[in-house]
Amino acid sequence: MAIREVLKMGDPRLLTPALPVEDFASSRLAQLIIDMHDTMRALNGAGLAAPQIGVGLQVVIFEAGSNPRYPEAGSVPFTVLINPLLTPLSDELEEGWEGCLSVPGMRGLVPRHTALRYQGFDAAGQSIDRSVSAFHARVVQHEVDHLRGILYPMRIRDLRQFGFTDTLFPGQNLQDD
């Protein structure tokens, strides 16, 4: 099990756009995905992007099921998404509270598309093409933003809706994403 250090907001590597994966058969990619999975699980995350552990490749993973940090979230299957392309399915945006392992201890109200189509590849280089909504759509958008050098606070419209988790939600024991 390889739990990697998660970079924190302020590290310039989080602001650098990631490069596409070209070699799906590489042992480096396979080990990266294992490390990301171990790290996400150890930190009870709903997702993780390769740039968050200092690897500038277009790789994200996500999953939600019985996560104490997201009791209201529907089930999202474990997914490895490489070289993703997102296409909104409508112009409708919904604001929702987000946190991030790279912005520990904070939450913000972030607008996201309510439904989208995502395309890309899995760890074996097989095509993925899904249309999703609700929390599933939110987590994909959040993770793919990391590949573009965007952290969720950059999307917050009203900074009065951004703050420390324990102050915004006293007694709720919420952690970072």
Image (tube, helix red, strand yellow):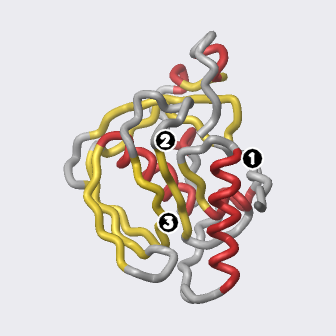
Give the image location of residue 131, x and y in percent. 25, 58
The residue under the point 61% across, 73% down is 57
Q: Could you say where residue 109 lies in the image, as x and y percent from the top left?
A: 47, 29
Could you say which disc has been placed on residue 8 in the image? 1
Give the residue number, with chain letter if any, for mark 2: 155
Q: Residue 112, located in which quarter of the rendered image?
A: top left
Mark closer to the observer (3, 2): 3
Identify the residue shown where x is 64% and y is 30%: 175
1 vs 3, front mark: 3
Asked if labels 2 and 3 touch by Cβ distance under 8 angstroms, the answer is no
Crowding around mark 2 (Cα neighbors within 10 Å: few <14, some 14 to 19, many 20+) is: some
- Taking the view exactly as shown, the residue that stands out farthest to the top is 171
> Horizontally, is 157 left or right of 20 in the view?
left
Q: Which badge, 3 or 2, comes first in the chain's sequence?
A: 3
Q: CA distance from mark 2 to mark 1?
A: 17 Å
Q: Secondary structure at mark 2?
A: helix
Instruction: Assign a secondary structure to mark 3.
Output: strand
User: Dot 1 surroundings within 10 Å: few (below 14), some, or many (20 or more)?
Assistant: some
Numbered tag placed on residue 80 in the rendering: 3
Residue, far left: 90
